[in-house]
Image (cartoon, helix red, strand yellow):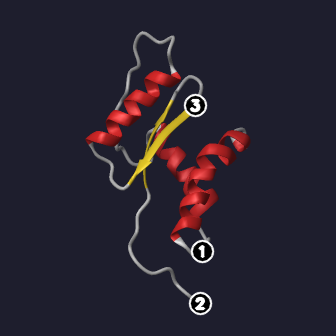
């Protein structure tokens, strides 16, 4: 079986609204101050009526709702799947966040 070569990474930074379960994300080569700034700007654009948005930066494994969200993505997109190219892998993950997740949320 052919294997994908290289060690490319897709980095996704996301937020999950605990009231509406709306998922907002940005992706980039690295997660850094610039992507965090992009995330904050996107949250402000997506929530124009809000006077305050509280963001909890959390990396608690398997406990927080966002960690469960990442687990759902892994189950639907990564586990027991092979992607021939990195672009196919990237398109599938971003497609999950943009289309599959909103369409299949109740499942």
Image quarter of residue 34: top left
Distance CA(mark 3)–CA(mark 1): 28 Å
Give the residue at x 40% y 34%: 39
Q: Which residue is mark 3?
A: 22
* Image spot of residue 51 (x, y percent): 42, 9
* Image spot of residue 98 (x, y percent): 62, 44
Give the mark nearer the N terminus: 1 vs 2: 2
In terms of secondary structure, where does tag 2 sit? loop
How packed mark 1 is, by other alpha carbons closer than 10 Å (few <14, some 14-19, many 20 or more), is: few
Give the mark nearer the N terminus: 3 vs 1: 3
In terms of secondary structure, where does tag 3 sit? loop
Distance CA(mark 1)–CA(mark 2): 10 Å
Image quarter of residue 11: bottom left
Question: Are discs 3 and 1 less than 8 Å apart at CB?
Answer: no
Q: Which residue is mark 2?
A: 1
Give the residue at x 45% y 27%: 43
* 83 or 58, nearer to the observer: 83
Image vertical order of residue 41 relative to residue 105, above or below: above
């Amino acid at each position: 079986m052919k294997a994908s070569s290289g060690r490319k990474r897709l980095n996704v930074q996301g937020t999950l609204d605990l009231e509406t379960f709306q998922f907002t994300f940005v992706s980039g080569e690295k997660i850094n101050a610039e992507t965090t700034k992009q995330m904050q700007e996107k949250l402000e654009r997506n929530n124009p009526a809000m006077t305050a948005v509280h963001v909890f930066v959390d990396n608690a494994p398997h406990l927080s709702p966002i960690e469960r969200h990442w687990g759902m993505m892994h189950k639907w997109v990564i586990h027991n799947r092979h992607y021939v190219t990195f672009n196919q892998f990237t398109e599938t993950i971003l497609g999950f966040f943009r289309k599959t997740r909103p369409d299949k949320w109740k499942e």
